[in-house]
């Protein structure tokens, strides 16, 4: 299993010290080449699950094994490095860096991981072509359409060929056509052998996912 | 191709450079605030240094002027002393003071050889010996009374070879001898009888050509005619005799006069010595007072300049501190706002694997670039402004020293680094999960 999540729990303290369980003992396994979708209403804990599984948020309890490696047993700096090399993220808000060009945005993970190379630049060009962004390669995010921005964000997530791709509502801001394109590419990346965890309430994911989990109040209600 | 690709490399510098170009307003105002801080610092230092140099020059000029004035003052006193009379008057021991007062000249004579005995005795306390024979006479030819003085100039004091030429003449005589057949006249004698140099006068049947007429001195000299000593001895019928010896004791201290009297009477026991100690003491006292006064003027000027400098330094310190504090606050606010505005950017960078020190580097790098750029511009502006306001002409870099320039070059980067550190650390410690969970 490329990604294994076991008994993950996370609570937040809200007003008056009231504790809210965002994720409550969730376990999940995703093999290479598998696309798993988790859907559910807003506030059910989907994003918290994704952030914990992606190594960005320490769980209160439970484990995350990435390629067999216990992510939260690693020192923070080492975990950052593993994340840079093995994990890709796509978010609803794109989070492109506004003053960098599309190409630079796509290559930015190589700065964090220190993996810049000519072949990486060639891969960036390949992704730009594949995602139909050739005419936008030297444009800044402010000059792009919403669909183009998400495609650029997807290219950025894929630049290091991560073994696991996490996508949090990647189609939330897109029209139908662009949503289809993005979902096709995400599914296509799973077909290339990666493990993909897709958190969404977009029903269009439907038949593209190998498994679909429904989440409610921090737990999987069924699948 | 590879070169081009390397130039296209995306790294921390790309991020910093692109962001600086993207947020021009913040960048320009940040640099500007640091430029002002650096320029004020450098210009103030140059102004203070320029002021210090100007004070040093002023004090040196004042000291030089005072030194010249002191030399002039001493010279004036030497001339005044010579014109006023002599320090020591050696007369016959038989001379009664009452007769001297009544007649106005010595009535008891001593031998002319006495002056030579004194000169050859090896005495060192007397510098100049002037034998004189003087009487008040009725000038029959002009029907008037005058003082007639016979002089021969200075008798060389052999114990003072430094004053003498190889021919035993004084290098700088304090009284010229009267040439043979000639006479020098006091101002009133000449004026009363309408005499000028070149006129011939007859006294007791002997003719003398007027050699020179002295300007008015306001004393008995104005009523005196000076002729060669031997002619006076002939006219008075006292060959080989003189009234006394005028000894100018030069610059000796007051305390040595008793010693002078002792030495002179030991060599010439039949003489008595009249002292003019009050004149010497007065001269020394005035000279010391003048010296003290000049020293006081110098010290007062120094103290005044020092007070001014302290005041200027205090003002400069306050000004520099305020400007630096304002620049630091501005940089802090700029970077802090920048961190807030770039919160999502920090979140995604951390999510895709940027480590804390890399995020810190992005924000601190921006601060330091602003600082380095501002240091160069600020230094140049500060040097130009400092030299301009210090009144230095083009090309005059005297008050600009390496320490000030180095300080100016270091100030802005250090200031930017310090002011930008806290917000940068805040940025580096942002929790990406918190940021990304906000959506």
Image: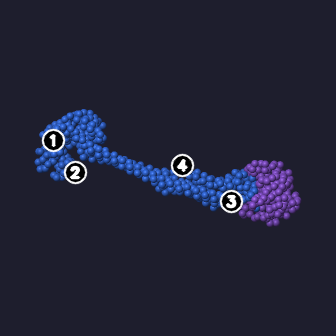
Chain colours: A purple, B blue
Question: Mark 4 or mark 3, which is nearer to you?
Answer: 3
> How many neighbours does mark 2 have within 10 angstroms: few (below 14), some (14-19), or many (20 or more)?
few
Q: Is residue A27 left or right of residue B218?
A: right
Residue, disc 3: B340
Q: Is residue B169 left or right of residue A7?
A: left
Residue, disc 1: B107
Residue B282 drawn at (x, y percent): 29, 46
For the residues labelled 3 and 1, the Cα–Cα distance comes to 114 Å
Point out the tag, 3 or 2, that comes first from the N-terminus.
Answer: 2
| Circles 3, 1 touching at the beta carbon (< 8 Å) | no
Point out the tag, 2 or 1, that comes first from the N-terminus.
Answer: 1
Residue B218's tag is 2
Residue A3 drawn at (x, y percent): 83, 52
Q: Quadrant of the C terminus of chain B?
A: bottom right
Determine the residue positioned at 83% across, 61% down.
A217
Determine the residue positioned at 29% across, 44% down.
B281
Q: Is residue B424 above or below residue A180?
A: above
User: Can residue A164 be seen here?
Assistant: no
SS at circle 3: helix
SS at circle 4: helix
For the residues labelled 4 and 2, the Cα–Cα distance comes to 65 Å
Q: Are marks 4 and 2 on the same chain?
A: yes
Pinpoint the chain carrying mark 2: B
Q: Are marks 3 and 2 on the same chain?
A: yes
Question: Mark 4 or mark 2, which is nearer to you?
Answer: 2
Determine the residue positioned at 38% across, 48% down.
B295
Residue, disc 4: B403
Please tell me in which quadrant of the rendered image residue B40 appears.
bottom right
Pinpoint the chain carrying mark 1: B
């Amino acid at each position: 299993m490329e990604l294994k999540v076991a008994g993950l729990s996370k609570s937040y303290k809200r007003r008056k010290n009231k504790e809210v369980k965002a994720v409550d003992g969730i376990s999940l396994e995703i093999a290479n080449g598998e696309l798993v979708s988790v859907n559910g209403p807003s506030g059910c804990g989907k994003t918290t699950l994704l952030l914990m599984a992606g190594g960005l948020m320490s769980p209160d309890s439970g484990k995350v094994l990435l390629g067999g490696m216990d992510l939260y047993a690693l020192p923070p700096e080492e975990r950052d490095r593993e994340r840079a090399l093995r994990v890709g993220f796509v978010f609803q808000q794109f989070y492109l860096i506004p003053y960098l060009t599309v190409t630079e945005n796509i290559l930015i993970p190589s700065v964090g991981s220190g993996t810049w190379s000519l072949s990486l630049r060639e891969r960036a060009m390949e992704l730009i072509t594949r995602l139909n962004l050739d005419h936008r390669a030297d444009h800044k995010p402010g000059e792009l359409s919403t669909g183009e921005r998400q495609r650029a964000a997807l290219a950025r997530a894929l630049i290091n060929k991560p073994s696991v791709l996490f996508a949090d509502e990647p189609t939330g801001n897109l029209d139908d056509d662009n949503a289809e394109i993005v979902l096709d590419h995400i599914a296509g990346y799973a077909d290339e052998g990666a493990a993909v965890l897709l958190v969404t309430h977009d029903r269009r994911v439907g038949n593209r996912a190998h498994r679909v989990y429904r989440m409610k109040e921090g737990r999987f209600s069924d699948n | 191709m590879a070169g081009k690709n390397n130039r296209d490399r995306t790294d921390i510098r790309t991020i910093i450079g692109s962001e600086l170009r993207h947020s021009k307003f913040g960048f320009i105002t940040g640099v500007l605030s640091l430029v002002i801080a650096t320029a004020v610092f450098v210009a103030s230092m140059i102004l203070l240094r320029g002021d210090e140099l100007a004070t040093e020059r002023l004090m040196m000029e004042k000291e030089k002027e005072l030194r010249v004035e002191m030399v002039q003052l001493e010279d004036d006193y030497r001339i005044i002393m010579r014109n006023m009379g002599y320090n020591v008057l050696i007369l016959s021991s038989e001379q009664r003071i009452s007769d001297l007062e009544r007649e106005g000249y010595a009535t008891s004579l001593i031998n002319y050889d006495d002056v030579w005995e004194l000169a050859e005795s090896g005495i060192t306390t007397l510098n100049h010996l002037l034998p004189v024979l003087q009487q008040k006479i009725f000038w029959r030819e002009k029907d008037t009374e005058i003082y007639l003085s016979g002089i021969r100039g200075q008798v060389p004091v052999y114990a003072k070879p430094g004053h003498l030429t190889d021919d035993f003449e004084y290098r700088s005589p304090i009284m010229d001898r009267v040439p043979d057949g000639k006479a020098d006249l006091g101002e009133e004698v000449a004026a009363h009888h309408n005499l000028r140099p070149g006129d011939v006068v007859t006294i007791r049947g002997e003719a003398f050509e007027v050699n020179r007429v002295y300007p008015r001195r306001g004393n008995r000299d104005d009523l005196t005619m000076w002729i060669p000593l031997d002619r006076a001895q002939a006219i008075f019928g006292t060959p080989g005799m003189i009234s006394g010896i005028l000894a100018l004791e030069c610059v000796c201290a007051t305390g040595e006069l008793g010693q002078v009297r002792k030495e002179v009477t030991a060599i010439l026991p039949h003489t008595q010595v009249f002292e003019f100690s009050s004149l010497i003491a007065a001269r020394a006292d005035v000279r010391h007072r003048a010296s003290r006064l000049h020293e006081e003027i110098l010290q007062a000027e120094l103290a005044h300049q020092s007070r001014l400098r302290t005041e200027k330094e205090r003002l400069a310190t306050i000004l520099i501190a305020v400007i630096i504090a304002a620049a630091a606050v501005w940089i802090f606010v700029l970077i802090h706002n920048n961190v807030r505005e770039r919160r999502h950017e920090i979140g995604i960078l951390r999510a895709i694997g940027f480590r804390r020190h890399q995020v810190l580097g992005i924000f601190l790098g921006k601060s330091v670039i602003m600082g380095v750029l501002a240091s160069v511009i600020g230094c140049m502006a500060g040097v130009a402004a400092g030299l301009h306001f210090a009144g230095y002409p083009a090309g005059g870099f005297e008050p600009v020293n390496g320490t000030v320039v180095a300080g100016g070059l270091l100030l802005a980067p250090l200031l930017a680094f310090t002011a930008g550190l806290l917000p940068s650390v805040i940025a580096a410690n942002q929790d990406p999960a918190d940021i990304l969970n906000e959506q």
